[in-house]
């Protein structure tokens, strides 16, 4: 199936998917968020060859999502560590985890709990209003043109 | 590049990506969340052929993310409408949009604003603790084994 580039689309979801829309990208980010930094550990967890993993990690470094930090310069060995741009994907990953828990694995089958370090409570993603502070459901959302809208057809006429 | 199946992975992110990890899936869900329901409108917005779009919509219906609702039974025409499982992806899409706005397009270049219908404030994704109610940053998170953990290696030893 042909891979269409989204790079010229006037939409930040399309732009995000242009960078992290390949199925494997977010699995590497998942592992990095769980604390994996070493090439061999990524390889073992993802079950892929050295060549394929090298290509993938190089792409994430090129996109500024991971950075290399030398831990043994003599042998050219390094850790792969998330940048602020990479750490910014935590909400995407948490939202995917919750959706998978709710709609695929089902309640009681969650493999991992994400907890608040301070109080031990479950941490979940919320949609909340910056102005009034309330949690907002899909039915309470509306989309409006933003300052960067160049393609008015992005917002369909209702 | 070989497509490895995540279906047997004991991880809800992997399970979610097994369903929505193809680059085009979330673009169709984006359009459905924006109110698109008709085949020809999806086709025009995504710029793909009838055959390809048919395959993609059929997959989303098979996964229970979209459902068909007849609007002209005589001509076998139907709308594609998000199910509750599909609407559950709104947080994933909002998180991707915010990440694309922040890290790719940049502040001031947002094509779309997502607003609270009641008060007009900007709506954003948050990670918040169910117990104490506080917003939580990545540094304040910790992962723990959940009731469905069958692969203890999912949580790396620190």
Image (cartoon, coloured by chain):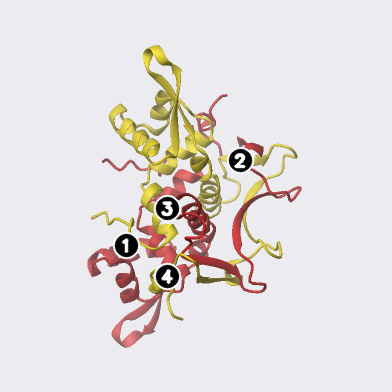
Chain colours: A yellow, B red
Q: How many marks?
A: 4
Q: Mark 1 points at which residue?
A: B56
Q: Whole-Å distance between the Cαs marked 2 and 3?
A: 20 Å
Q: In which quarter of the image is residue B38?
A: bottom left
Q: Mark 2 lies on which chain?
A: B
Q: Whole-Å distance between the Cαs marked 2 and 4?
A: 36 Å
Left or right: residue A100 compared with residue A73? right
Q: Is mark 3 on a helix, strand or loop?
A: helix
**Looking at the rendered structure, which numbered label has been put on residue B67?**
4
Q: Mark 1 lies on which chain?
A: B
x then y, percent, for residue A69: 46, 25
Q: Closer to us: mark 2 or mark 1? A: 2
| Pointer 2 local density, CA inside 10 Å: few below 14, some 14–19, many at least 20 | some
Q: Mark 2 points at which residue?
A: B138
Which one is in front, A143 or A119?
A143
State which tag comes first along the sequence, 1 or 4.
1
Left or right: residue B32 compared with residue A95? left
Q: Is residue A65 in sight in this rendering? A: yes
Q: Mark 3 lies on which chain?
A: A
Pointers 1 and 4 within a single chain: yes
Q: Is mark 1 on a helix, strand or loop?
A: helix
x then y, percent, for residue A90: 54, 44
Q: Is mark 4 on a helix, strand or loop?
A: strand
Q: Whole-Å distance between the Cαs marked 3 and 1?
A: 20 Å
Q: Name the residue under label 3.
A: A16
Q: Closer to us: mark 4 or mark 3? A: 3
Residue B149 against residue A68 in the figure, above or below: below
Q: Closer to us: mark 3 or mark 1? A: 3
The quadrant of the rendering that contains the N terminus of chain A is bottom left
């Amino acid at each position: 199936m042909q891979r269409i580039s989204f790079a010229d689309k006037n939409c930040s979801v399309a732009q995000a998917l242009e960078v992290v829309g390949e199925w494997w990208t977010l699995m590497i980010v998942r592992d990095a968020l769980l604390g994996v930094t070493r090439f061999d550990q990524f390889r073992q967890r993802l079950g892929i060859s050295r060549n394929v993993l090298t290509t993938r990690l190089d792409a994430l470094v090129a996109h500024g999502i991971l950075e290399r930090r030398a831990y043994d310069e003599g042998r050219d060995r390094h850790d792969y560590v998330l940048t602020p741009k990479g750490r910014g994907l935590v909400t995407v990953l948490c939202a995917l985890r919750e959706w998978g828990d709710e709609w695929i694995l089902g309640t009681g089958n969650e493999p991992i709990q994400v907890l608040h370090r301070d109080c031990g409570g479950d941490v979940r993603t919320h949609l909340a209003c910056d102005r009034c502070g309330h949690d907002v459901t899909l039915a309470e959302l509306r989309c409006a043109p933003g300052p960067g809208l160049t393609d008015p057809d992005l917002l369909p006429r209702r």
